[in-house]
Image (cartoon, grey):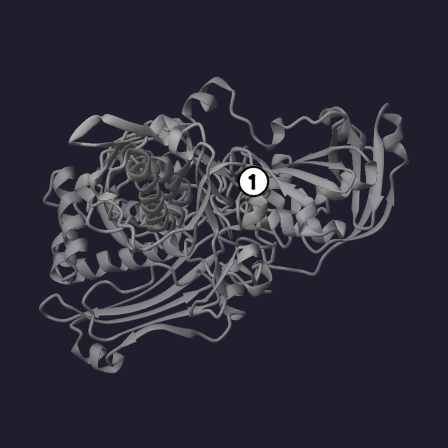
């Protein structure tokens, strides 16, 4: 692990002012921590046995501006705005005076990365506590300056004053000027109560929106240090292929091209990326094919045959007793194919080496992972590598690995000049860590009263997130066999986190099965769910979604094309109603309307949450209707968007979002939850439209036609 930035080094860089150090409670391995207070480690042992480091800094500058320094990154989820809202609220400073510094390993302390809808959920309480500490320090300093007890003072718009004599006031800038105060966040300082907040909970336009619209926003590919060379790298034709021989002499015919051969890394460098690519086309390589592997048609049989033994994730009651009590039993199998991340911005990194200092500008969700990997590849200490994170043009869990940064660093060292590696779309598809293909075997039953009496669930390679049974089921067993985060030789290539990992697979199987049980019980989808639920939050969110849609819902199949689905993702509750139209001749599914209700605890930025929900639904149309990777063994057949179809603007339905604010609860995150039930709600809507059940995602026109018989 990378060494965190020591507090004393940060203070040397930052200069004067008031600094509060705090931890978001992420356990760090011992090698990631300094070990002494000077090195920045709190050395407080958590349940994992790792010390928890003070891995975020809050600073009040001598000019009155306020900054947060964190190793997180901004990739479109909006934390650069929501974190600033929380700071402005707790510190009583104008929102316009707040700066958020993200993903700079020279200024920010260690962070594990940005994923899993964790930032607001984990940062929120800790950030507010740090702000409350800073506010207490300011009131204490103001009390000394004004000769007034701190408890009589109040803060507003970056100033402290005594309400009894409001003319006697002092600004934050005056209080911070000439100071070098350090504090650790203290629980003695109390954050504001929800009703006292004036910035959080109110819509705020994104602070990075203007720059993204007018082209000022900078990404890894926009970094152009003097002398930059662009790289085109020799790639294998398939996963597992081995290079037997290579002839690079032809590349020299392109003027200005430079060939680098460093072990397994063979590349052509040029000042112009198009000429580097043209020179690479002249390189001749002979490859030995990799071992035989399944294709996209036979992948599910292959996975089932090569699955490990199951692990019990959740269990209660007695399945045999539940089966005996069942009036109707539903047996099914559910399948989803590999899905690519396909971000708008491919993996990119620019690296410059000057003396013993390495600077990396990566498109990455894990800047400190980049620092560690580049340092290891170059054989230098981590502190010699500075990672500066520009904006990231989409990640969705696919930019946690940093191959492109390591390649750029090795080529920069070999060439003696700055190098940029920007993957082509073909490379992006080839080296992606896909959402894993997975299957679920499911058996469940209802009694004569419409109660679910048993639930036997077996997930192969999908993962366990959102697999918890939130219905009232007395006899249940949930088993998993491997998952998205586990490497497995059963897959012919790498897999990994994909927006809402595991949850979309589980929601599809679980909520489709619930609709099957509702039909078996002779009930409509909403009535059946409410009949088997006591969780008040889930009941409320379901009723809110249906009410907004304009219920009641029909018993399926009604021919109206209406579907319902719900799920819980990291304590965020989502309920969704959709209406579709199905062409009975072609099998094409047209999504007409989607209503999504979300209970995510406190909503820091309602506008940002709405945008994330809308983006999740639009992206979810892809994995539900068209996105499924085609491959033959280790050879990826989908190399661009000509064959791998992403959602288009013409697909976009009428989307309505409904937030259920619960300011008394901590925020639980909104970057991923709304994508997870999209496959399930559309599958249920298709069944309601045509009476044909799709058991495989994506529901391509061919599969819908086949389901209709």
Q: Is residue 543 found left or right of 74 in the rendered image?
A: left
In the depicted view, which residue is nearer to us: 169 or 302? Answer: 169
Check the image and name the residue furthest to the front. Answer: 147
Q: Residue 450 in the image: x percent, y percent?
A: 12, 65
Q: Residue 426 in the image: x percent, y percent?
A: 63, 38
Which residue is pictured at 50% across the width and 41% down the height? 395
The answer to whether residue 401 of the structure is visible from this angle is no
Check the image and name the residue furthest to the right. Answer: 249
The answer to whether residue 324 of the structure is visible from this angle is yes
Q: Is residue 486 found left or right of 140 in the rendered image?
A: right
- Number of callouts in the render? 1
Q: Residue 103 in the image: x percent, y percent?
A: 53, 41
Q: Is residue 172 found left or right of 532 in the rendered image?
A: right
In the depicted view, which residue is nearer to us: 372 or 87? Answer: 87
From what the image shows, is residue 599 above or below residue 653? below
From what the image shows, is residue 253 above or below residue 78? above
Q: Residues within 10 Å of mark 1 (few under 14, many from 20)?
A: many
Q: Is residue 698 found left or right of 162 in the rendered image?
A: right
In the depicted view, which residue is nearer to us: 657 or 40? Answer: 40
Asked which secondary structure carries label 1, the reply is loop
Label 1 belongs to which residue?
104
In the depicted view, which residue is nearer to us: 252 or 228? Answer: 228
Question: Considering the image in quadrants, where does the N terminus appear?
Answer: bottom right
Q: Residue 678 in the image: x percent, y percent?
A: 32, 45
């Amino acid at each position: 692990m990378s060494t965190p930035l020591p507090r004393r080094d940060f203070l040397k860089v930052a200069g004067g002012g008031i600094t509060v150090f705090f931890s978001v409670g992420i356990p760090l391995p011992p090698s990631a921590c300094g070990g002494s207070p000077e090195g920045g480690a709190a050395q407080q042992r958590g349940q994992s046995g790792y010390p928890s480091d003070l891995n975020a800094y809050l600073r009040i500058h001598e000019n009155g501006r306020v900054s947060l320094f964190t190793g997180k990154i901004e990739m479109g989820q909006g934390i650069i705005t929501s974190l600033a809202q929380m700071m402005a609220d707790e510190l009583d400073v104008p929102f316009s005076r707040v700066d958020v510094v993200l993903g700079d390993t020279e200024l920010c302390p260690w962070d594990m990365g940005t994923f899993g809808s964790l930032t607001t959920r984990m940062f929120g309480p800790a950030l507010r506590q740090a702000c409350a500490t800073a506010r207490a320090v300011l009131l204490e300093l103001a009390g000394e300056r004004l000769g007034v007890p701190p408890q009589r003072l109040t803060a507003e718009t970056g100033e402290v004053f005594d309400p009894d004599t409001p003319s006697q006031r002092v600004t934050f800038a005056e209080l911070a000027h000439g100071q070098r105060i350090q504090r650790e966040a203290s629980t003695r300082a109390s954050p504001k109560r929800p009703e006292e907040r004036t910035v959080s909970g109110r819509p705020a336009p994104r602070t990075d929106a203007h720059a993204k619209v007018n082209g000022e926003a900078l990404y890894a590919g926009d970094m152009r240090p003097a002398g930059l060379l662009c790289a085109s790298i020799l790639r294998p034709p398939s996963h597992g292929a081995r290079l037997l021989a290579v002839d690079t002499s032809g590349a020299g015919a392109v003027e200005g091209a430079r060939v680098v051969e460093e072990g397994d890394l063979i590349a052509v460098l040029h000042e112009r990326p198009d000429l580097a690519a043209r020179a690479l086309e002249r390189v001749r390589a002979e490859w030995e094919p990799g071992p035989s592997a399944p294709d996209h048609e036979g992948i599910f049989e292959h996975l089932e045959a090569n699955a490990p033994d199951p692990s019990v994730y959740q269990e209660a009651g007695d399945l045999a007793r539940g089966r005996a009590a069942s009036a109707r039993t539903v047996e099914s199998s559910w399948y989803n194919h590999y899905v690519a991340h396909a971000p708008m911005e491919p993996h990119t990194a620019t690296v410059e080496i000057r003396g013993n200092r390495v600077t990396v500008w990566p498109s990455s969700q894990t800047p400190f992972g980049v620092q560690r990997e580049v340092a290891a590849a170059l054989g230098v200490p981590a502190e010699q590598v500075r990672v500066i994170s520009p904006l990231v043009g989409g990640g969705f869990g696919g930019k946690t690995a940093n191959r492109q940064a390591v390649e750029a660093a090795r080529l920069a060292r070999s060439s003696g000049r700055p190098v940029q590696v920007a993957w082509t779309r073909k490379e992006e598809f080839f080296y992606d860590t896909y959402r894993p293909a997975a299957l679920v075997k499911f058996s469940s039953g209802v009694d004569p009263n419409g109660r679910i009496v048993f639930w036997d669930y077996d997930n192969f390679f999908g993962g366990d997130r959102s697999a918890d049974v939130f219905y009232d089921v007395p006899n249940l067993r949930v088993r998993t066999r491997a998952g998205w985060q586990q490497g497995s030789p059963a897959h012919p290539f790498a897999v990994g986190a994909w927006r809402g990992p595991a949850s979309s697979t589980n929601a599809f199987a679980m909520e489709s099965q619930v609709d099957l049980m509702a039909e078996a019980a002779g009930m409509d989808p909403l009535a059946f769910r409410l009949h088997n639920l006591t969780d008040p939050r889930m009941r409320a969110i379901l009723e809110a979604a249906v009410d907004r849609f304009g219920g009641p819902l029909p018993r399926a199949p009604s021919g109206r094309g209406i579907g319902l689905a719900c799920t819980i993702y990291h304590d965020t509750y989502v309920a969704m109603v959709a209406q579709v139209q199905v062409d009975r001749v072609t099998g094409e599914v047209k999504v007409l309307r989607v209503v999504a209700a979300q209970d995510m605890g406190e909503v820091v930025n309602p506008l940002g949450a709405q945008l994330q929900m809308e983006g999740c639904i639009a992206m979810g149309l892809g994995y539900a209707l068209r996105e499924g990777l085609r491959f033959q063994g280790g050879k990826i057949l989908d190399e661009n968007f000509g064959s791998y179809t992403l959602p288009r603007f013409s697909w976009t339905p009428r989307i309505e979002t409904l937030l259920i604010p619960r300011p008394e609860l901590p925020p639980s995150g909104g970057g991923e939850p709304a994508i997870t039930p999209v496959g399930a709600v559309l599958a249920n809507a298709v069944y309601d439209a045509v009476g044909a059940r799709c058991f495989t995602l994506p529901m391509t026109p061919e599969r819908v036609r086949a389901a209709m018989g």
